[in-house]
Image (cartoon, rainbow, N blue to C red):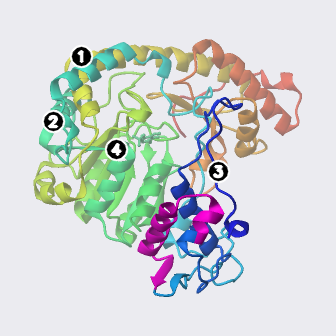
Amino acid sequence: MIEIIGPLARPPEAGSADGGATKPAPLQKQLIERLQQAILTGRLAAGSLLPSSRLLAAEMGVSRNTVVIAYEHLAAVGYVVADKKGTRVSPLSSPAARGEAPVRSAAPDVAYAARVAQFAATRTHADNTFPLTPGTPALDRFPLGAWRRALERSMDRALPLALGYGTPAGEPALRDAIAAHLRMARGVRCDGAQVVITEGAQEALNLCVRLFTNPGDLAWVEDPGYRGAKAAFNLGDLRTLPMPVDAEGMAAPASAWLAQPPKLIYTSPAHQYPTGAVLSVARRLELIAQARRCGAWLIEDDYDGEFRHTGEPIASMQGLVDDAPVLYVGSFSKTMFPALRIGFVVLPRAIAEHTAVALQEMLRGGHRLEQLALAHFIDSGEFGRHLGRMRRLYRERQQALRDALTAHFARARILGGDCGMHLTLRLPAQVADRTLVERALAKGLNPRALSGFALQQRVETNGLVIGYGNTPAERLAPAVDALATLARELEGKPRRALKHGSKTASTAA
Ligand SMILES: Cc1ncc(COP(=O)(O)O)c(C=O)c1O
């Protein structure tokens, strides 16, 4: 038997080279594992008789009791059967145990759900800390001390009760704090009972899909647009219809409302992602009126509306008229930090009441200490002060990026910038955005390809989405210089030719 299962490992002698630091598993555990492996791989064939416990104990140099317990364990899980004649290997259905060639696991023939194939790889995570990454805030400017104190405060006050399940829709204190903040800062008409806390905006989108659609329903998405919205719609087995975006935001043709009426519409009105267009009031009112007429729901993603850089703040679409059919989605990923994974959706009052039971069954609450800490962070004014500091910082960084882009990409058009943490740069057709992005990544820069956000590729969707949130102002000019050099190489032109002219625009075209 020892040729089949091999000798067992013994503890090193005292005073041996590693001083006994690496201890093998107990003999009984080793014996069980060796026998199991031998059976699963067919080295001990089905039906074969195992040696008596006395013989095996002598052969392996262990006590008889060790073998008896190992055999009993193997019999209890079905690897062996014991009868009057002894202990035999059970007939198992693993191919190796039947003496067949093992099944290759490299390309498993698994019947996945059809929706799995609809996801295309568009994100890279390892490089999210690189300069120019869109969507990453200034993590090194986050007030860690104040956050730590808020966490400690919630631990001191809420433990141990807050280790248990919480209210499914989230901590009431946080829901109230968010509602008060949104009423004041974003003109959202709500109270805490309408707020449902989610695992970031992504889970809020998924929740909207679950509450308001059935598989096969039609959803409109901005094109180019946020891939998270498309992912949520895929997950709900929805059909999606791309809607073009222009300088005034989502531009739904009048005919589409009749020919292809949606159940759900995703829009980012404060700062269209990624073109940066601000949805005009005329379009907001039209969207609300048409959605009402055809019984559709508008998802208003206000992901970076808190960072308004030009003119007066533009209030939310949700608060524009009474009872707008709007599901207002927000996230703390940009205003706090992405790993917090706290977002929310504000449901219309009647919907919040009608869906209370469903929500209780669908959600489990959780992250209670963080939610309580965040409630305090908001109520104490720390959140507002942080937002103010970040607004000033991002304005300064945006100006530095805009200046560098104007200097280095004279003929390219700059889009967006009224809000948020990124600018979008249109590139000439000769400079393929994905190739440029690949080469930039190799140099430690992480802008994204505009075409990656487009469902239908067009000339206008060749460009770069350039984040400035996580990049100090003084690093922006050298980074843009490096991008311009790469773009020149792709265009096949000498470097200096870039630096002429100064045509820029601040909104999408
Ligand atoms: C348009 C848009 N909405 C929402 C989010 C935030 O998503 P989450 O809260 O899931 O991090 C992002 C993040 O990049 C975004 O770009």
Q: Position of residue 280 (x, y in %)?
A: 37, 40
Q: Are marks 4 and 2 in contact (CB under 8 Å)?
A: no
Mark in front: 4 vs 1: 4
* Residue bearing mark 1: 381
Residue stretch in magenta:
55-83
Q: Do the residues bearing badges 3 and 4 touch, measured as CB atoms within 8 Å?
A: no
Residue at (56%, 83%) from the top-left corner? 93
**Residue kind at label 2, given as amino acid type:** Leu
Q: Position of residue 360 (x, y in %)?
A: 17, 55
CA gap between label 4 and label 2 equals 21 Å
Badge 3 element: loop
Task: Name the secondary structure under disc 1.
Answer: loop
Assign the magenta stretch its main secondary structure.
Answer: helix
Cβ of mark 4 under 8 A from ligand 1: yes
- Total numbered labels: 4
Q: CA distance from mark 3 to mark 1?
A: 62 Å
**What label does residue 199 carry, if any?**
4
Q: Quadrant of ligand 1?
A: top left
The mark nearer the N terminus, 3 or 2, is: 3
Residue beneath label 2, please? 161
Question: As rendered, which of 227 and 76 lies closer to the eye?
Answer: 76
Percent position (x, y) of residue 144?
A: 39, 17
| Residue 9's disc number | 3
Nearer-the-camera pick, 364 or 177: 364
At 48% from the left edge and 26% from the top edge, which residue is drawn?
Answer: 137
